[in-house]
Image: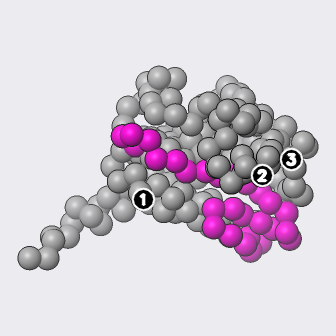
Amino acid sequence: MKTLFHKEEIFYDGSQLKERWIYKNFGIMGDACVSFIGGCEVKSDYMADLEDLREKKTIKARKMLHFISEIFSFPEKSCPLLQRLFVVVIKEGLEMKTGKSFLRKGNDLYLDEKKLNISVAIPSISSSLIHIGLNIDGRGAPVPVITLPELGIEPESFAVETLEKMKVEFEDSLKAIYKVRSER
């Protein structure tokens, strides 16, 4: 898996969660995860979670640390499992840095009943697409949130560390597949 922290801000509106967006915008082909900082407001046209869309929920925050992954090496039905693996990697990193224990409910992280992230995973025709956003400035969010600065976490350095940990977990998972023989 190739990774990149992009230093320029990008406003996330959901349109970025589509096939080959990483390749088109950053020239990274294949399994990849790109991180960046920027605002967030997902319009209904790009709302991937149909339950959220039906319930007319909003996804919004003034500033977030975003991770977008596109994975080709695993079947598309494994997309939610990869999403949860990446959320667990983030959770472990946060707990090591803060000494606090975060609650994971599916693909969401909470501290003291305040939500830290948004996350969605969608299969495409040829890949799995995952978006995870961590609150930096939660103003405008439709639910009570906790932010990285409130936790004493600097977003850019956390992004770089997290990308490396995701890469290691991803590559170790592939190695686990490659090193065993199938039963006859």
Name the colour scheme.
one colour
Quadrant of the snapshot with the N terminus: top left
* Residue type highlighted by circle 1: Ser
Rendering coords of residue 40 (x, y %): 76, 37
Is 21 situated left or right of 183 in this image? right
Residue 150 visible in rendering: no
Residue 108 located within the stretch drawn in magenta = yes
- Front position in the image: 117 or 155: 117
Determine the secondary structure under disc 1.
Answer: helix
Is 178 situated left or right of 170 in this image? left
Q: CA distance from mark 3 to mark 2?
A: 16 Å
Quadrant of the snapshot with the C terminus: bottom left
Rendering coords of residue 147 (x, y %): 83, 53
Determine the secondary structure under disc 3.
Answer: loop
* Residue type highlighted by circle 2: Glu
Determine the secondary structure under disc 2.
Answer: loop
Segment colored magenta: 100-127
Q: Is residue 74 above or below residue 81?
A: above
Q: Which residue is mark 1?
A: 78
Q: Is residue 27 above or below residue 129?
A: above
Residue at the (62%, 44%) spot, across then down: 48
Rendering coords of residue 141 (x, y %): 86, 47
Question: Residue 89 — which label?
Answer: none
Q: Which residue is mark 3?
A: 141
